[in-house]
Amino acid sequence: MKEHNNTVKSHKKLYKSGKTWMVATLLTVGLAGGAAVTGTTNAHADEVTPAQATGTIQAGQQAGQQATDPELANAQSDAQKQQSTIDSANAQLKDQQNQLSEAQGQQSSAQQELDQAKQAQQAATQNDPAVKDAQAAVDQAQQQVNNQQQVVNDAQTVVNNDAQNVQQNILI
């Protein structure tokens, strides 16, 4: 008689959740050798009653099932552990999403407060007579600087023209 070789194959797949990698294992149970499905066995018996045949088949099936039960239990245990890891990762992801949402809300509130403070500062300085006087003095000083710069630019133009005339007179 041929023996039944049961095999358990596992395929692993990586998933990335945020900064962490998750591993999912898919398990398949297969029968190797082909004897379990298509094998032929020659048996020589005087006579077999249907009740004896059924009992023999059931006993054979139970024996085959007992051989795979530990492997199946291990596979199920591994799958449950992996599902637990996935559930834990999903819970962590949900917590992180909630924290992100809360941080975004706080950032938005802080931005609104900053905008309001800037508007209040602008309104306060706009209506202050001392600030207006100081701004007028700055504007007047800037105008004087601009006027003096124009005088310097005009003088520079005269000097450059005189230098060209002198240069031309030397060459002649």
Image (cartoon, helix red, strand yellow):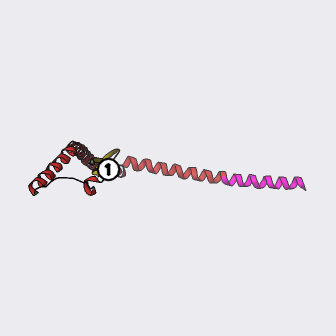
Q: Amino acid at mark 1?
A: Gln
Q: Is residue 169 above or below residue 91?
A: below
Q: Position of residue 23 (x, y in %)?
A: 32, 46
Q: Residues within 10 Å of mark 1 (few under 14, many from 20)?
A: few
Left or right of residue 20, residue 152 in this image: right
Q: Quadrant of the C terminus?
A: bottom right
Q: Per the image, is 136 magenta?
A: no
Q: Which residue is situated farthest in the right direction here? A: 172
Q: Per the image, is 160 magenta?
A: yes
What secondary structure is marked by label 1?
Answer: helix
Residue located 68% across and 55% down the image: 154
The reply to whether residue 106 is visible in this rendering is: no
Q: Position of residue 136 (x, y in %)?
A: 45, 51
Front in this rendered view, residue 64 or 98: 64
Q: Which residue is situated farthest in the left direction here? A: 51
The reply to whether residue 33 is visible in this rendering is: yes
User: Mostly what secondary structure, the magenta segment?
Assistant: helix
Q: Position of residue 46 (x, y in %)?
A: 15, 53
Which residue has dot 1 on it?
A: 111
Q: Position of residue 103 (x, y in %)?
A: 28, 46
Left or right of residue 28, residue 166 in this image: right
Front in this rendered view, residue 155 or 42: 42
Residue located 17% across and 50% down the image: 61
Front in this rendered view, residue 14 or 21: 14
Front in this rendered view, residue 149 or 94: 94
Count up the numbered dots.
1
The part of the chain drawn in magenta is 153-172
